[in-house]
Image: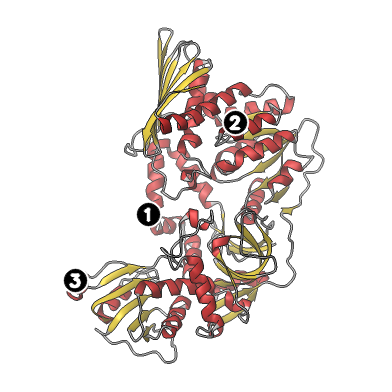
Amino acid sequence: MKQLIQDFKSGAIKVVEAPAPVVAPGRLLVRNAFSVVSAGTERATVALGQASLLGKARSRPDLVKQVFDTVKREGVAAAVQKVQSRLDAWKALGYSSAGTVIAIGEGVEGFAVGERVACAGQDYASHAEIVSVPVHLCAKIPEGVELAHAAFTTLGAIALHAVRQAEARIGENVAVIGLGLIGQLTVQILRAAGCRVTGCDPAVMMDGLHAPRPDIADAVIIAAATDANEPLELAAKLCRDRGRVVMVGVTGMEVPREIFYRKELELRLSRSYGPGRYDPQYEEHGVDYPIGYVRWTEQRNMAAFLQLLADGKVNVAPLVAHRLKIEDAARAYELTGGVVIEYGGQVSSLSARLAGGAGSPSHGSIVLGVIGAGHYAQGVLLPEFKRHPEVVLHTVCTATGANAKKAQEKFGFAGCTTDWRSVVADKDVNTVLIATRHNLHAEMVAAALRAGKTVWCEKPLCLRAEELDEILQAGSDRLMVGFNRRFARWAQGLPAGPLVMRYRVSVQPLPAGHWVNDPSVGGGRILGEVCHFVDFLQFAAKARPLSVFAQGFGGDNVQVAVRFADGSVGSVDYFDVADAGLAKEHFEVFGGGRHVVVDDFRDKGQAEAVRQFLGAAKTGGPMPIPMEEIVASSRMTLAVVESVRNNQAVLL
């Protein structure tokens, strides 16, 4: 299928041929008919991508701080690798579209194949021929509403939510500053609500708007996009005493205190298209808000805007200045006015896989299929695999077609796909690397083992004991888990047991909405990362773990104590409450009359782990980590979670 993307490193905008997404649980697969270019948000994104590295840094000081924190904790090389990985990516453009449902994911109710729907969401309702959209970001299009007009629904929901935030009532005077697409839609919605509307934008004229007058507006909605502070200052002048100022655009936010204080003005922010935005439970997992408590969610705002279109209360036809075919869509950001992208009746390809044969691999080659190509896979694992000449890069699979195509081009894979099952089923592929989000690991590992593949699974292996049982039932030990610390140079030649071990790990807090914190997706950082360190205790002790006791607070702060069969004991202190300057990892071991300390180390063993794995994959010899140790480390990690929950030791 064709998709419009921006290469974030070069800033170039282009239409690429990417594999179509596959239907997923909780989602609709939609064939787009039209999508709308958001003049403000998208052009700002494009401008950031086209800025120099210094310009990008000035625009995102929060990310610059993260880079410096990484330098302090992990060194310059790790920081450079992370920055390069994030820059060398394609960004999907677009977040407002309309089309026809062609497939329905498991668990979706209330929609049918063939229905017309409006779609919303960055990375979901993209400028692409086929999109995969969570159910709460879709709304049915009423009869009589053209698909081209319904494609404005996301922008309309943004405007509608701003009007709700302003609490605009019949007969009130409301001023709108900034008359781009959002501003003009806001004006129409306010008129439909019975308000007297003032419009302010020297570049845009709208019929029937009143001239702005100071000290008269009951509410002001700022829909402008500028770095300047003038819109906020103007809003304060236009408002009456105790008026309301609502920010839906992106402008300077230095509040002029004197006038806000004197008039006792209220400043409100309008968060995109309504309640549910940025909540993964609502948007990604389909957990709705009860209508009795949250009347207007983002999906209900979308439906309300569509009804305004159906009733003729809002007319978007005059907003369409340009129509472009998807093949010509790279020109969209050079044009002024509303731009609608049109998708023809024939999709270039519905295939979830872009074929590309690896030819006839030589005898003994490792023919690699990769499932998941996020920052860690692209920044660390794939470069390590690629530098070994015996590895044939056959197919790369990611959830989104643009990312799959980018990874294919970047690393030289023969093909790319969005369907992981096709990688597992491919008879030419003999080795599979799995580096997806954690909740997908177990199913993919079990399927690949049953298909006779040699498997590298990035940690963790699983999130639940039942998943571990499923993997064991696959009946194969051709499995490696990315417990790479045990392969580091400093980890060789440790004292003989019994040992006393201490492993201290200081990490930075993850954002609240990070997928690792989602129990159903990432499982939390104990399962996702503490597994590394309990595995290393087992490696150092060279003995079977007998029991685990753990206690902690806040999800990411835990003390773990492990007892081993030879009498060794080990502890892991994992926390996110220290300052950024503290070294991330510190290991001490006492035994056999020796004391070894490793502090703030850089070698984490990835290169050696890959080398040994590939040697075993090529020869069919034993895997670098025995299966019983992989299982023991996985059970220890699950026991940490259980012990924290129950405040009791867990016997293994």
Q: Secondary structure at mark 2?
A: strand
Q: Quadrant of residue 436?
A: top right
Q: CA distance from mark 2 to mark 3?
A: 60 Å
Q: Mark 2 touching mark 1, by CB under 8 A?
A: no
Relative image position of residue 75 (x, y in whole percent):
42, 37
Q: Quick one: label 1 or label 3, which is nearer the N terminus?
A: 1
What residue is drawn where x is 65% and y is 28%? 613
Q: CA distance from mark 2 to mark 1?
A: 36 Å
Q: Quadrant of residue 608?
A: top right
470 with respect to 363 (left or right): left
384 with respect to 519 (left or right): right
Judge depth for marks 1 and 3 and give the one in front.
3
Q: Quadrant of residue 363?
A: top right
Q: Quick one: label 2 or label 3, which is nearer the N terminus?
A: 3
- Viewer-nearest residue: 242 or 131: 242
The residue that mark 1 highlights is 61
Q: Local crowd at mark 3 within 10 Å, few (<14), some, or many (≥20)?
A: few
The residue that mark 2 highlights is 481
Q: Secondary structure at mark 3?
A: helix
- Viewer-nearest residue: 86 or 36: 36
Q: CA distance from mark 1 to mark 3?
A: 30 Å
Decide: is 342 above or below 407: below
- Identify which amino acid the numbered label 3 is placed on: Tyr
Q: Mark 2 touching mark 3, by CB under 8 A?
A: no
- Identify which amino acid the numbered label 2 is placed on: Val
Q: Secondary structure at mark 1?
A: helix
Q: Quick one: label 2 or label 1, which is nearer the N terminus?
A: 1
The residue that mark 3 highlights is 261
Relative image position of residue 542 (x, y in whole percent):
53, 15
Q: Residue furthest top?
A: 593
- Identify which amino acid the numbered label 1 is placed on: Pro
